[in-house]
């Protein structure tokens, strides 16, 4: 039973909402509407002539093989960046849950990477794996592996996935630890008495009960992989080599602010917005059904 | 079907706290043994050690002649009903009951048969598809019982299973548990802090206090001959009145020849106290002691009335039948049959009363 707070004043609730609404209007609706408008226009590089082209920009973007390639890149990158941190964080959280001495210390250490800015995280990994100066790159080459992310697109992709996933592990870890703590100990004891060994207990009791947490993280990680990884890609590969690591978001930036094709860039961002809305809707519609909220 | 034998079982926690201090106990095959005591007396810890959820610091626990100290809970062939039921929230009632059987690789048709059978016994048949959160407290309790029954274990363990239910449902479930346990004939160990539950359920009553067993016996034997002042005051409601001989003498009781040599405490059950008329009829040839009490409060509860009174600085409860015709303030002369008195020494241990023959001589 949550008791509702009743405001005696009629205007006050609206006044309290104003800052939030203002921020949403200025930083979301206004740019979004600008993007919608821009996506129907074509502008010359100097910003002197603007012509209305209707859906022309969209037609052009969707028939561009580079764009289709970027969609594939994004799918691979996002799926890996959303799922890898979840898997690693879950393993770490389960192990951290068993630590008794120095539990707080481990947890604090685990959370640190989250405080690192994306560009910095990218630079860290770039240094470690830079073919000329990187420590790991040196070890890899010494081990006989031909490591060169500056030329090999797959290796470049691997590198940004690692950087992006590494940074997101902390966040996922934090939520899994909280999720694990919320599972009553007596449930695991009951399962133990019921004849389930540790591994079985994990898959039949712990994992299903973590489903709400996992689902939440899936949504958050997907959004992270789409938008918040721009800094990493920009710092580490700038979308290269070739266009091997050019995700949709990076392409929006590149076409708009580097190549100055504002109309095409706006059309891409509108498509991107559609994709993310659709993806989140699908996640809530289908994945959430299988989630049990205790 | 199994006997459970505990031999000098101890539990010492990492911090040095000794929760269980050397318990020797044998629960005979098919018996319902109730561990009762105040919170923190070690009864739950002891049960969890039998279940395998706590490590045993020293001593041995045997189930059916097999030492189980080193065995996982799963290997001990036990089933446990938890205080908060510990039902798996993401599984249906059916799956909750089937879980233990599936883990043991029971064939599907047999699981189906056993779950249906248990559901029938517990009247859960129509609820098998529900999730635990869609059930009432009493129904959850039944599912927890069902989960234990389907497994057909050697021993049932109950950890305060009724403490989350309301008073009426608790009484009802108590009767059901007793009936079920009799029908199945499975050795059971039941932990509770409720002395009424303990008295009504137990074949073997074990009263525990600060990690030790105070007394083991049939419930009525424990009630009639409490081994210590702790048991005397824990078992029975309202509890036994414990007074010193000095208190009693000061208000006119004549104890000459009745008091055993070591006795420093005299115990009188509230129902053994009464008005002089009522008690002289009851006592017969054994004789009475009589003394004055100062009345504090009279509490009529219907079938009987509780009179709360004082003897000097000690409080006394008198249980009077029906609507007591006694004044609500002032003094009252009360009596107790001599053969209903209990005596305890300086360590709180029971002392035998002076034999009747010796009493006459005195």
Image (spheres, coloured by chain):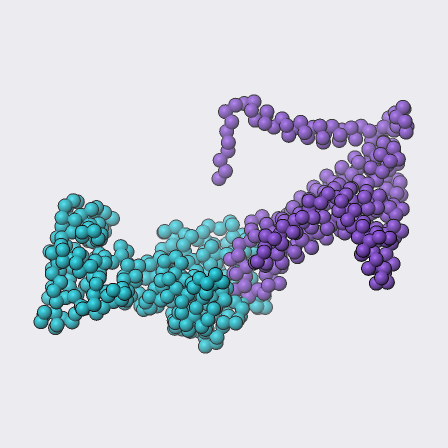
Chain colours: A purple, B cyan
Q: Is residue A2 above or below residue B178?
A: above
Q: Would you say A66 lies left or right of B66 here?
A: right
Question: Residue B232 falls in which quadrant of the image?
Answer: bottom left
Q: Is residue B298 left or right of residue B165?
A: left
The residue sitting at 39% across, 64% down in the picture is B211
Q: Nearer the viewer, residue A99 or A92?
A: A99
The residue furthest left is B361
Residue B220 appears in the rendering: no
Image position of A289 with respect to A14: above or below: below
Q: Which residue appears at 48% of the width and 39% of the height?
A: A1
- Total labels drawn: 0
User: Does residue A184 show up?
Assistant: yes
| Image quadrant where residue A65 sits | top right
Whether residue A120 is situated above or below residue A48 in the rendered picture: below
Position of A89 with respect to B11 (left or right) is right
Question: Toward the viewer: A44 or B169?
Answer: A44
Of B48 and A64, the residue lying toward us:
B48
Q: Looking at the picture, how far across and down is residue A120, in whole percent?
A: 76, 44
**From what the image shows, is residue B328 above or below residue B20?**
above
Query: Which residue is rendered at x = 67% and y = 27% of the image?
Result: A22
Residue A144 picture location, percent across and down: 86, 63
Residue at 39% in and 50% down: B166
- Residue closest to the eye, A269 or A136: A136
Residue, far bottom: B65
- Residue B198, percent from left and from top: 35, 61
Residue A285, percent from left and from top: 67, 44
């Amino acid at each position: 039973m949550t008791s509702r707070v009743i405001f005696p004043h009629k205007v006050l609730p609206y006044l309290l909402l104003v800052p939030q609404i203002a921020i949403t209007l200025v930083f979301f609706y206004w740019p979004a509407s600008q993007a919608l408008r821009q996506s129907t226009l074509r502008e010359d590089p100097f910003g002197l002539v603007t012509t209305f082209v209707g859906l022309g920009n969209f037609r052009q973007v969707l028939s561009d093989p580079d764009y289709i390639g970027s969609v594939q890149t994004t799918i691979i990158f996002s799926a890996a960046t959303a799922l890898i941190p979840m898997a690693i964080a879950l393993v770490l959280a389960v192990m951290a849950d068993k630590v008794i001495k120095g539990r707080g210390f481990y947890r604090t250490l685990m959370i640190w990477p989250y405080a690192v800015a994306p560009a910095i995280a990218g630079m860290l990994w770039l240094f470690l794996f830079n073919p000329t100066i990187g420590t790991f790159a040196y070890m890899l080459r010494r081990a006989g592996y031909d490591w060169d992310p500056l030329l090999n697109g797959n290796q470049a992709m691997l590198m940004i996935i690692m950087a992006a996933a590494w940074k997101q592990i902390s966040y996922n870890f934090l939520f899994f630890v909280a999720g694990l703590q919320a599972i009553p100990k007596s449930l695991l004891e009951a399962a133990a008495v019921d004849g389930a060994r540790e591994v079985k207990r994990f898959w039949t009791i712990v994992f299903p009960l973590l489903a709400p947490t996992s689902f939440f993280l899936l949504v958050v990680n997907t959004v992270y992989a789409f938008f918040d990884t721009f800094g990493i890609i920009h710092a580490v590969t700038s979308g290269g080599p070739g266009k091997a690591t050019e995700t949709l978001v990076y392409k929006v930036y590149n076409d708009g602010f580097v190549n100055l094709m504002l109309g095409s860039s706006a059309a891409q961002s509108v498509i991107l917005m559609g994709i993310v809305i659709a993806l989140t809707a699908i996640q809530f519609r289908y994945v959430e059904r299988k989630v049990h909220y205790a | 079907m199994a006997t459970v034998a505990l031999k000098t079982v101890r539990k010492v926690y990492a911090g040095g706290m000794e929760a269980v201090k050397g318990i020797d106990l044998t629960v005979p095959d098919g018996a319902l043994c109730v561990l009762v005591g105040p919170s923190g007396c070690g009864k739950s810890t002891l049960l969890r050690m039998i279940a395998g959820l706590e490590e045993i610091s020293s001593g041995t626990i045997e189930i059916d002649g097999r030492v189980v100290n080193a065995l996982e809970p799963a290997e001990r062939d036990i089933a446990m009903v938890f205080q908060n039921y510990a039902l798996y929230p993401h599984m249906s009632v059916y799956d909750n009951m089937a879980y233990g059987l599936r883990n043991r690789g029971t064939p599907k048709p047999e699981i189906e048969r056993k779950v249906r059978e248990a559901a029938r016994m517990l009247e859960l048949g129509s609820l098998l598809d529900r999730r635990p959160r869609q059930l009432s407290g009493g129904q959850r309790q039944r599912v927890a019982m069902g989960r234990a029954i389907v497994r057909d274990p050697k021993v049932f363990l109950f950890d305060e299973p009724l403490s989350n239910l309301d008073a009426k449902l608790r009484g009802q479930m108590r009767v059901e548990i007793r009936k079920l346990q009799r029908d199945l004939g499975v050795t059971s160990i039941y932990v509770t802090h409720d002395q009424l539950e303990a008295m009504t359920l137990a074949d073997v009553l074990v009263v525990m206090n600060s990690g030790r067993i105070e007394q083991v016996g049939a419930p009525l034997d424990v009630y009639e001959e409490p081994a210590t002042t702790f048991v005397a005051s824990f078992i029975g409601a309202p509890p036994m009145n414990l007074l010193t001989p000095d208190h009693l003498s000061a208000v006119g009781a004549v104890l000459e020849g009745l008091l055993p040599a070591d006795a420093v405490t005299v115990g009188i059950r509230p129902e053994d106290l009464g008005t002089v008329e009522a008690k002289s009829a009851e006592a017969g040839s054994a004789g009475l002691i009589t003394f004055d009490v100062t009345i504090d409060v009279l509490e009529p509860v219907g079938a009987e009335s509780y009179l709360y009174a004082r003897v000097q600085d000690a409080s006394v409860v008198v249980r009077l039948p029906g609507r007591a015709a006694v004044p609500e303030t002032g003094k009252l002369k009360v009596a107790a049959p001599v053969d209903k008195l209990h005596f305890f020494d300086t360590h709180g241990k029971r002392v035998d009363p002076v034999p009747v023959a010796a009493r006459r001589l005195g």
